Each structure stands twice: as structure tokens, then as C-alpha cells.
Image: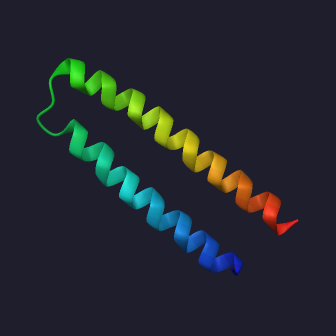
Amino acid sequence: MSQSSDQQQLDRIEKKLDMIIEHFNIGASSQAKRSSREIDDIVRSKIYHLQNRQRRAKK
């Protein structure tokens, strides 16, 4: 894949994950919001991992 299509794929993944996170936050109890923050941390960690993998692939 080209660099731009890799970036576009990461952008699409991030948008989908943001939508999932937002879904958990709508009308959630404080306990559910705590879990959604944990989910947010996990998701962002996965995005960071994907970006690092992409950088390594370019070398």
C-alpha cells in the first residue's frame, strides 16, 4: 500500500473508533463512563500501535 492509502486507512479506523467511544458516552451512567474511558485508552493504544507498525513498514 502507498503511504497515503495507509494514512487514509488509519484515519477511517480512528473515525470508526471515535464513533464507538461516543456511543458509549451517550446516556451512560458514571460507571459506564468510567468503562468508556478505559475503552478509550485501549483504543488509542491500538491506534498508536498501528501507527508505529506503519512507520516500521516504511523503513
Residue 45: x and y, percent?
A: 57, 39
Residue 5: x and y, percent?
A: 60, 79
Query: What residue lies at 41% left-to-right and 27% top-to-bottom?
Result: 38
Q: Residue furthest left?
A: 27
Q: Residue furthest right?
A: 59
Question: Where, by quadrant of the figure, is residue 33 drawn?
Answer: top left
Query: What residue lies at 39% left-to-right and 52% top-to-bottom?
Result: 17
Q: Quadrant of the N terminus?
A: bottom right
Count of numbered labels shown in the rendering: 0
The colour scheme used here is: rainbow
| Left or right placement of residue 4 versus residue 23 in this view | right
| Left or right placement of residue 54 versus residue 20 in this view | right
Question: Where, by quadrant of the figure, is residue 29 drawn?
Answer: top left
Query: What residue lies at 16% left-to-right and 40% top-to-bottom?
Result: 26
Q: Quadrant of the C terminus?
A: bottom right
| Left or right placement of residue 26 versus residue 53 in this view | left
| Left or right placement of residue 15 versus residue 30 in this view | right
The answer to whether residue 43 is above or below residue 3 is: above
Question: Where, by quadrant of the figure, is residue 34 drawn?
Answer: top left
Query: What residue lies at 55% left-to-right and 64% top-to-bottom?
Result: 10
Q: Residue furthest top?
A: 31
Residue 24: x and y, percent?
A: 24, 39
Residue 15: x and y, percent?
A: 40, 60
